[in-house]
Image: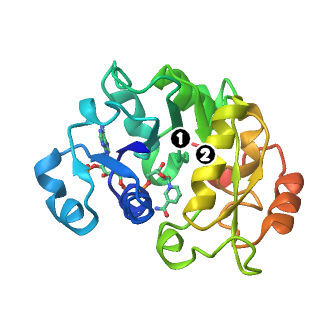
Amino acid sequence: MKIGIIGAGNIGGNLTRRFTAVGHDVSVANSRGPETLKALAEETGATPVRVEDAARGAEVVVVTVPLKAVPDLPSGLFDGAAEGLVVIDTGNYYPRQRDGRIAGIEDEGLTESRWTERHLGHPVIKAFNGTYAQDLLDRPRPAGDPGRLALPVAGDDEAAKAKVRALIDEIGFDTVDAGGLDDSWRQQPGTPVYGLRAGTRAVTEALAQAPKERPADFRG
Ligand SMILES: NC(=O)c1ccc[n+]([C@@H]2O[C@H](COP(=O)([O-])OP(=O)(O)OC[C@H]3O[C@@H](n4cnc5c(N)ncnc54)[C@H](OP(=O)(O)O)[C@@H]3O)[C@@H](O)[C@H]2O)c1
C-alpha cells in the first residue's frame, strides 16, 4: 500500500521504519525538505518528499507533526491522494510545554483530533497518540502473543477505522475501538490509557475509566 507520512520525528520516523519493514511503499516529509531525510531513506527504503507531495497516490496519510504546526501545513495537502484516502492523526495537545493555548480545544471543547480534522479539511482517525515512539520498534508481537500491546483507535468512519486497525495489526499491535472522534478525549494526554502498555482488556477498561474533564497539566 502507498502510505504518506507527514512528520519524520519520533513517531513519523518509527512509523516509516515499521511500515517499510512490512512491505509498504512509504513517502515521508518533514518541514526542512527531502534532502534532510537521506539517512532515513537509506535506512528504510522510504522516499523522501516535500510535504506537498507526501499524499500523492497514497491510500493512507499519517499526520504526525506537533499540534501547533497543523495550521501551518499547506492547503491542498491531500490533492492527488488515492480515492478513499484515510488520514491518521497521532497528535497530542501540550499547551504548556509546546503548543501554546488553543482556544478551539479549551473554549469550544473540541477534542484534539476534531480540531486537527477541521484544520486539515479531511476526516481523521486518531491512533498512536498514546504510544511511546520507541515501543513501535521494540514491542511489536505476533497476533495472539499474550504480551501483545493494544492501541486505542477512534474515528467516525468505520471503514477507515477498520483499515487503520488492520494496518496496526500488520505492524505488531492489537487495537481497541475507542469510538467516534468526539469520544477521543478518552485517549488524550493525562487519561488512564495514555501511555498504558497493556493488552486489549486493560486498554478497554482504561478507556471506560477516563474522566471527562481535561487534566490541569494539559490546560493552557
Ligand atoms: N514522541 C512520542 O513518543 C509521541 C507518541 C505519541 C504521539 N506523539 C504525538 O505525535 C506528534 C508528533 O510527535 P513527535 O514526537 O514525532 O514529534 P517530533 O519528534 O518533534 O517531530 C515532528 C516532525 O514534524 C515535522 N514538522 C513540524 N512542523 C512541520 C510542518 N509545518 N510541515 C511539515 N513537517 C513539520 C518536523 O520536521 P522538522 O524536523 O524538519 O522540523 C519533524 O519531522 C505530536 O503531536 C506528539 O504529541 C508523540
Q: Nearer the viewer, residue 151 or 91?
A: 151
Tell me if residue 164 comes above or below residue 80 in the rendering: below
- At 68% from the left and 42% from the top, the residue drawn is 162
Where 82 sits versus 89, above or below? above
Select label 1 or label 2 by which is in front.
2
Q: Residue at x 30, y 25 (%)?
A: 74
Q: Hey, what amino acid is under mark 2?
A: Val
Other residues around mark 1 within 10 Å, as few (<14) / some (14–19) / many (≥20): many
Residue 76 pos. (x, y %):
34, 18
Kindly state the secondary structure of the residue where label 1 is placed: strand
| Mark 1 vs 2: CB contact within 8 A | yes
Q: Which numbered dot is residue 189?
A: none
| Residue 179 position in % (x across, y down) | 79, 39
> Which mark, residue 88?
1
> Where residue 87 appears, x then y in whole percent?
51, 35
In the rendered image, the quadrant that contains the C terminus is top right
- Report the number of numbered marks: 2
Q: Tell me the number on the disc at residue 164.
A: 2
Q: Quadrant of residue 40?
A: bottom left
Badge 1 amino acid: Ile
Q: Quadrant of residue 5?
A: top left
Tell me which label, 1 or 2, sits earlier in the chain. Answer: 1
